[in-house]
Every structure is written in structure tokens, then in C-alpha cells.
Image (cartoon, rainbow, N blue to C red):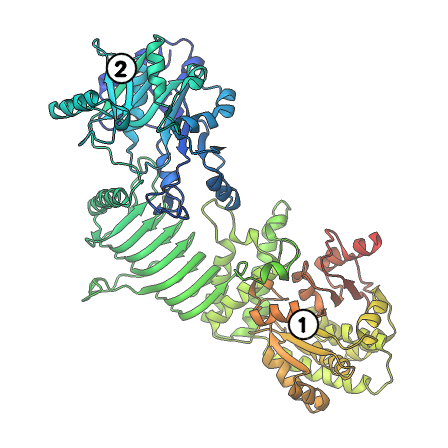
């Protein structure tokens, strides 16, 4: 025996929630099911495998065929194909039959759902041909019954499928067709019955004889004419046995699957017509049908909002994606205008104004927030305290947070914020921020023609994401380390004000705690370089300090000039110069390790840089550098600088390379990022009296200084400017300085010389070089990686494999 509760648990639905389903029908349904045999057999019988016919091209929607009616017409988050199959009663994957061009789109757009099996109808040979295209999958199915519906019917209510299924089992049918009472029978598929009332089958209007057409008109006048909706339940094996018996229609061009009904009737199998009593909207084969469906849908949704206490503008087009038996969570006194969409887990506070806004994922909107032309995904707008009066003329509500024309993903927005034309991803925007025309947080891959040329493999702006470390015991300690480092190193440099410090600390903590709808931490998909870039930006916004490392950079620059004056007077070989340029990275007053060494030994810089000249290169590609740069004919070279202090040594070597005829593009940051050199920093260094020749080279254009666009540690190629990308693509080679640039430019589609020191665990893992800490200086690397080189492990592993 099977119970109502057990049936409901299979499909996760309450039968009493199905409109127009009576208690007697439920009772008859359960009784009929329990005549079928064991509980396992009943569960298999009652769970059909649905075939969704979506092979039509929609030529009446778009004669050119470029706009597909099932994929390109959207109602909120869902397109026509999604909506047409959202209510199908089944636990099995949908079999979706599509035409070749539609299938190619689904493959290219990676839209093939995990709960769908796609079959291709190679020729436009009707609904019967579509069913034949699904035969290979249907033969493997374990379902007793197959459901058939269309992929262009987005407005069908859920009860039409359930009532058809329940009628099918109550009538103990082998095939059931859902029919409706039409307003007209012309150009429709009409139902025919024998003298005993048994369902014979259907005929399209153009296949009917004049007598049959007249009969249908008379039935329409009498209120007993029925036309075909296409929704069908059929015994799977009996259907497969008879598919080859289908005959062609429309001058031999189309098979109609509903002809199966007549074959079942003639063979003595039980046929059943379920007559759906409510109005059934047509599919979207014409724009007029789309408009009619939209009007009804929007009116229903407006009524829902009104019941929830929302002020709804008469023209509001409201769509939503809510879970079963769960209404949207919207506070009091809200006002919706224009096109508004809410996802299932969205929550709206009190006195909010939403206009032309889509809130997706697990977005929450606190009290007193106004959103206009906004798209937010997995984001949180913090609530404001209520102010009086609550309302105002024209806009209706006095909202303290106002966001316009912005796209926000994985973002927390503070109270009393004013944003306009802001694109933000994975960040926290402080309270009282007033921002316009800004890109904030973590950049995504640029949609540029040059992107695929710039990188040759899936690009990651760093060595690893934090999610790759999530299995380790100290993962939460790693998050705490980020917070502590931000507090002690960045925030302490940014402000001495206690309130601003606490505000900045809280923002960083909130950022580290950001989660998506699936409870995954936002930072789990980010690299350390991306996280630090986002933290740096947030602290700048919170404290108002644009360059927290300003004094560290100036001190490092001064020290670098002092050391260069001391060392450049010696006659150095090119190899010694390169070692000195690499070792210049130690001049870093933002490093606690370096500051400690200086405290212990005030001559540390003098001794370490002098030692570097005679040190060995841990990875030595000097011969390649000599061939491709020093002794080579003039080349176009892009030079990525790292820290501000060591940039002094970079420009010293660049000046000498330019003397050899090379054209060099020096690349710095567009904005402050830790102690890295910005474009303005590089211009100041180049203006120093030490670089008179370099100034002349810049004046003639032989040397130029540009921004990479990156505002994080290293060079995040997702932030690349068009100028930078073009410079790299047009260059003969790239010279990359420092660990940050090495970590973030793997896969760059260009010959690259990496000049860096291996310092710290991450560098040791990435390079395979562990510096000898007993030495004054060690771990100097001059590596050469040709364009298109793929090495999944360390640099040393790569060279060992050559």
C-alpha cells in the first residue's frame, strides 16, 4: 500500500495545494495506484519520464531565426524553455528535444542542465519526428509512462500537469491527452469520440473533412468542443512499438505524435481525454501570445505584492523565483516601480524603493534603501535607522541609502551610502561612502578581443586560491592572519584615528566573512593577491588615505639612490648588474623582517647588496638574457616593475638597455597597492638628477611609462588596460620583476624573463628555490620562460625537465 503522504514526499508537493483537485479525486487516485501492485512498482508507475519538444525555430517570432523563442525570451530569471518545464511532476531528468542549431547554442553556452538529457531532431519533421529523435534515450528509460509536453508553453499552471496525471491513473489509461475548451476551433487540433464516448484521437483542422469541420463548429456552439493542449501521458513500451506506424501530414513533411491515440484506440488499449476546465494560454509562437501571457502574469504578481503590503506602480513588471509554499519576505511600506525581479532567498526590509532592479541569490536589503537600475547578486545592503517623516514628494520614500545604475556581486554595502554607476565584485563598501563611476573589488576576465591573445591557459592572478587550502587545519587561522596583517601593517599606516581604525578593521572582517547563497566563503575562490588588493582598496575607502605606504616608499627610494651611487661607480659586468637589480628588492621598509635586520645590523643593506654582486643565481638564465637582450639587435621590451625602492635599480638598468637601442615600456600601478611603484612614482624617479640620460630617452619616446591597470600586488591581468595589453602583445619580450609579478603573470603569452628573489613559503613552493637564511643574501633568480610554456609545478621542475 502507498499513502497520500508517501506520494507527496516523492514529488515534494502537497496534493491539497493543487488548484481544483477535490478530496474525492485524491482518494480515487490513491485507490487506483494501490491496484498496481507493490509499493516499488507504484513509485515507478507514478513517476513519468517527460519529453519536452523544443525543436521548433519560432519563425513567426523572428523570421530570420536568430532569436530563438525558447532560449531568448525571458521572464525574470527564466527563459521560455525553463518555465515550460518547471511544473512537470517527475523526479527523472527531462528529455529535451531540440534542433541542431539550438543544441549547438546549449553546448557553446554551457547551458546543458544536469537535470536534462538533450536529443537532437535533425529534420523539422513534426512532433512525431521529435519523439522519434528521443527514442534512443526512451528505450533505456526505466519509466513505465512517458509524459510529453512542449518547450514553448511558459504560462501553463502547475495543476494542468497534475490533474492530467491523476486522471490518467484514475481512468487506468494507457494514453491520456489533456484537452481544453477553446474559444475557436478553426486552425486547432480537435478531439473526436466514438458513439460509446471512447476517445478516438485528434485531427488538425487542415486534415479534417468539411463534414468534420462543421461538426466541430456545432460542438463549439453547444459548448462541447475540445481541442488539444499537447500534454500527454503514454505507456512507454506501447508507444515505442507504435512510433513507426505514424503517417506523414502536411504534404508528407510532418509526423504528429498525437496520432498514437488512434493507434492505441484501434488496438484496444485504453485511451483517455482529460478536459482541463480553466483557460489555457497559448504558447509563445506569436508576439501577441507573449504579450497576453505577460499581462496576466504581471497582474497576478502585482496582486501578490499588494497582499504583502507593497505599494505597486500600475506599470510594474514583477517577476520572482520563490520556493514552494513560500512567499517573498518584504517589509512594510515598500514601493516597487518598473521591472523588478526577486530570487527565492531575497529579503527586503521596511520602507525600501525598488525601480528596475534585479535582486539575485541570497541578497538582503535592509531598511530605508533605494535601488534604481540595480542588479545585485548575493549582496547585502545594511539597514538604516528610520527617519521621520518617512515619505517625501515625488520619490515617495526618504531612503538613506541610494544606489543607481550599479552592478553588485558578493558585496556588502554599508548604511547611508550613495552609489551611482558602480560595478563591484567581492568587496565591502563602508558606511557613508559617496562613490560614482567606480569599479571596486575583484575584477573578472575582461571582455576584450585581446584577452585570448594575452594568456595561453586558464588564468589565475596568484599561485593558489584560498579554497585550495580550505582542507588544511589552519585555514581559519589563515583568515585571521589576513585580518591581523591588515590591522598591524595596512590600517596602522592609514590612520591613527581610533574610530576609523575600528571601522576599517570591521570592514575587513566583514569581507572575510562574506558568503554566497551556497554558504561558500567568497574568499575561497580568490588568491592571496586578489584578497590583499580588495582589502587595500577597502581600507583606502574607509580611512581616506590613498597611499598608506607613501613614507615607506620614499625612504626606500632614498636608500636605493644612496646604494646606487655607492655601487654604480664600480665597473660591473652585465651579470653583476642583473644580480644587483634583483637584490634591490631587499630595500623594503614595509617588511618587518627587513626592519629587524636593519635594527640588528645598520649596515645590512650595504653588506647584502655588495654580497649580491658576487652571489650565485639559484636559477641562472643569464646566457639567454645575454643572447636575447644584451647582445641582440634593438627590441621592444615591456618591463614590469615591483617595489618603489628597487624600481630605482630597474630604471638604472633600463637606461643602459635603451642605450643599446632597445625600446622599453616601463609598467607601474595605476593606483597605490602596498609599496609597489605607481606610474607617478616612476615618473618622479625618472626625473631625478641621477637619470639625466633616461629623461632624454623618455622625451624622445624610446622609453615610456604606462599603467598596467592593476591595483593589486603583482599584475592582475584581469585589470589590464588596452594600452598595456597591446604593449605586451606588440613586444618582443617581457621582463618581470619581483615575486608579485611572477605569481600573477603565469601563462602570459609572451617570452618572459623573471627577475626575483625567492622569499617565503609561497615563493619556495612556486619556484622550487629555498634561500639559505644563513647567507646575507640568497635565492636570486633569473629565469626565462618562452611564450606558450606550460609548467604545472615549480620553475626548477620545469628546468629539470628540459
Tell me where residue 562 sits by quadrant. Answer: bottom right
Above/below status of 302 relative to 401: above
Nearest the eye: 596 or 123: 123
**Element type where label 1 sits in the image:** loop
Q: Percent x, y for residue 395?
A: 22, 64
For residue 757, which quarter of the picture? bottom right
Q: Which mark is residue 106?
A: none
Residue at (42% x, 70% y) in the render:
437
Lateral position of residue 721 relative to residue 384, left or right: right
**Secondary structure of residue under mark 2:** strand
Toward the front, the furthest residue is 251
User: Which circle marks residue 199 in the picture?
Assistant: 2
Relative side of 312 to 428, left or right = left
Numbered label tally: 2
Q: Residue at x 34, y 41 (%)?
A: 322
449 or 250: nearer the eye?
250
- Compute the Cα span from label 1 to label 2: 81 Å
User: Looking at the image, can residue 690 be seen?
Assistant: no
Q: Is residue 277 above or below residue 745?
A: above
Mark positioned earlier in the residue sequence (1 or 2): 2
In-front residue for pair 79/329: 79
The front one of 413 and 200 is 200
Query: Which percent across, then down, holds residue 73?
Result: 36, 46
Reply above or below: 723 against 273. Answer: below
**Circles 1 and 2 in contact, beta carbons < 8 Å:** no
- Tell me, yes or no, if residue 792 can be seen here: yes
The C terminus appears in which quarter of the rendering?
Answer: bottom right
Where is residue 729? Give x, y as percent.
Answer: 65, 67
Q: Which residue is mark 1?
A: 642
Quadrant (top left, top right, bottom left, bottom right) of the N terminus: top left
- Local packing at callout 1 (Cα closer than 10 Å; few below 14, some 14-19, many 20+) is many
Amino acid at each position: 500500500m502507498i499513502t497520500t503522504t508517501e506520494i507527496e514526499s516523492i514529488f515534494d508537493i502537497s496534493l491539497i495545494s493543487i488548484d481544483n483537485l477535490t478530496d474525492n479525486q485524491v482518494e480515487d487516485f490513491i485507490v487506483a495506484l494501490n491496484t498496481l501492485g507493490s509499493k516499488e512498482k507504484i513509485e515507478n508507475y507514478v513517476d513519468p519520464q517527460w519529453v519536452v519538444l523544443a525543436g521548433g525555430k519560432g519563425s513567426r517570432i523572428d523570421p530570420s531565426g536568430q532569436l530563438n523563442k525558447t532560449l531568448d525570451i525571458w521572464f525574470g530569471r527564466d527563459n521560455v524553455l525553463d518555465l515550460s518545464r518547471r511544473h512537470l511532476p517527475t523526479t527523472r531528468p527531462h528529455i529535451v528535444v531540440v534542433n541542431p542549431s539550438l543544441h549547438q547554442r546549449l553546448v557553446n553556452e554551457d547551458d546543458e542542465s544536469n537535470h536534462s538529457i538533450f536529443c537532437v531532431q535533425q529534420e523539422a519533421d513534426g512532433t512525431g519526428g521529435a519523439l522519434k529523435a528521443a527514442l534512443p534515450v526512451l528505450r533505456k528509460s526505466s519509466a513505465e509512462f512517458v509524459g510529453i509536453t512542449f518547450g514553448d508553453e511558459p504560462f501553463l499552471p502547475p495543476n494542468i500537469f497534475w490533474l492530467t496525471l491523476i486522471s490518467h491513473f484514475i481512468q487506468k489509461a494507457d494514453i491520456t491527452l489533456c484537452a481544453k475548451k477553446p474559444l475557436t476551433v478553426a486552425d486547432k487540433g480537435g478531439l473526436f469520440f466514438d458513439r460509446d464516448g471512447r476517445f478516438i484521437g485528434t485531427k488538425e483542422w487542415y486534415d479534417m473533412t468539411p463534414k468534420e469541420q462543421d461538426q466541430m463548429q456545432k460542438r463549439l456552439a453547444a459548448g462541447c468542443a475540445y481541442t488539444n493542449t499537447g500534454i500527454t501521458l503514454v505507456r512507454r513500451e506501447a508507444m515505442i512499438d507504435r512510433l513507426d506506424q505514424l503517417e506523414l501530414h502536411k504534404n508528407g513533411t510532418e509526423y504528429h505524435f498525437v496520432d498514437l491515440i488512434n493507434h492505441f484506440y484501434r488496438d484496444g488499449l485504453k485511451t483517455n481525454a482529460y478536459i482541463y476546465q480553466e483557460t489555457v494560454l497559448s504558447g509563445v509562437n506569436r508576439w501577441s501570445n507573449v504579450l497576453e501571457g505577460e499581462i496576466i502574469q504581471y497582474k497576478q504578481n502585482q496582486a501578490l505584492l499588494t497582499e504583502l503590503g507593497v505599494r505597486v506602480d500600475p506599470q510594474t513588471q514583477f517577476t520572482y523565483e520563490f520556493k514552494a509554499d513560500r512567499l517573498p519576505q518584504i517589509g512594510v511600506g515598500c514601493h516597487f516601480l518598473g521591472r523588478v525581479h526577486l530570487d527565492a532567498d531575497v529579503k527586503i526590509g521596511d520602507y525600501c524603493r525598488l525601480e528596475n532592479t534585479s535582486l539575485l541569490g541570497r541578497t538582503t536589503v535592509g531598511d530605508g534603501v533605494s535601488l534604481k537600475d540595480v542588479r545585485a547578486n548575493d549582496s547585502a545592503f545594511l539597514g538604516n535607522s528610520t527617519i521621520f517623516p518617512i515619505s517625501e514628494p515625488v520619490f515617495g520614500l526618504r531612503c538613506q541609502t541610494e544606489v543607481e545604475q550599479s552592478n553588485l556581486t558578493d558585496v556588502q554595502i554599508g548604511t547611508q551610502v550613495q552609489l551611482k554607476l558602480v560595478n563591484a565584485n567581492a568587496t565591502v563598501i563602508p558606511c557613508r561612502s559617496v562613490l560614482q563611476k567606480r569599479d571596486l573589488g575583484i575584477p573578472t576576465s575582461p571582455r576584450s578581443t585581446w584577452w585570448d591573445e594575452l594568456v595561453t591557459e586558464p588564468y589565475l592572478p596568484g599561485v593558489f586560491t584560498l579554497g585550495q587550502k580550505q582542507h588544511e587545519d589552519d585555514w581559519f587561522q589563515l583568515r585571521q592572519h589576513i585580518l591581523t596583517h591588515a590591522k598591524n601593517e595596512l590600517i596602522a599606516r592609514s590612520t591613527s584615528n581610533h574610530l576609523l581604525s575600528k571601522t576599517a578593521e570591521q570592514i575587513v572582517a566583514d569581507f572575510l566573512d562574506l558568503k554566497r547563497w551556497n554558504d561558500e566563503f567568497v574568499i575561497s575562490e580568490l588568491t592571496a593577491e586578489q584578497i590583499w588588493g580588495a582589502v587595500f582598496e577597502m581600507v583606502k575607502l574607509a580611512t581616506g588615505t590613498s597611499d598608506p605606504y607613501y613614507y615607506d616608499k620614499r625612504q626606500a627610494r632614498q636608500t636605493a639612490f644612496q646604494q646606487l651611487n655607492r655601487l654604480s661607480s664600480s665597473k660591473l659586468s652585465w651579470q653583476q648588474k642583473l644580480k644587483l637589480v634583483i637584490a634591490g628588492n631587499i630595500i623594503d621598509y614595509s617588511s618587518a623582517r627587513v626592519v629587524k635586520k636593519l635594527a640588528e645590523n645598520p649596515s645590512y643593506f650595504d653588506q647584502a647588496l655588495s654580497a649580491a654582486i658576487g652571489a650565485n643565481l639559484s636559477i641562472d638564465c643569464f646566457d639567454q638574457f645575454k643572447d636575447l637582450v644584451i647582445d641582440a639587435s634593438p627590441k621592444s621590451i615591456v618591463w614590469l616593475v615591483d617595489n618603489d625602492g628597487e624600481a630605482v635599480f630597474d630604471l638604472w638598468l633600463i637606461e643602459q638597455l635603451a642605450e643599446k637601442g632597445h625600446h622599453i615600456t616601463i609598467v607601474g600601478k595605476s593606483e597605490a597597492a602596498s609599496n609597489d611603484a605607481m606610474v607617478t612614482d616612476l615618473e618622479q624617479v625618472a626625473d631625478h638628477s641621477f637619470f639625466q640620460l633616461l629623461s632624454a630617452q623618455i622625451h624622445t619616446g624610446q622609453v615610456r611609462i604606462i599603467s598596467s591597470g592593476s591595483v593589486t600586488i603583482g599584475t592582475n591581468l584581469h585589470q589590464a588596460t588596452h594600452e598595456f595589453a597591446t604593449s605586451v602583445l606588440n613586444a618582443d619580450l617581457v621582463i618581470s620583476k619581483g615575486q608579485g609579478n611572477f605569481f600573477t603573470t603565469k601563462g602570459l603569452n609572451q617570452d618572459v624573463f623573471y627577475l626575483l628573489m625567492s622569499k617565503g613559503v609561497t615563493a619556495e613552493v612556486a619556484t622550487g628555490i629555498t634561500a639559505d637564511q644563513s647567507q646575507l643574501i640568497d635565492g636570486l633568480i633569473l629565469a626565462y620562460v618562452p611564450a606558450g610554456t606550460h609548467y604545472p609545478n615549480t620553475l626548477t621542475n620545469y628546468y629539470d625537465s628540459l
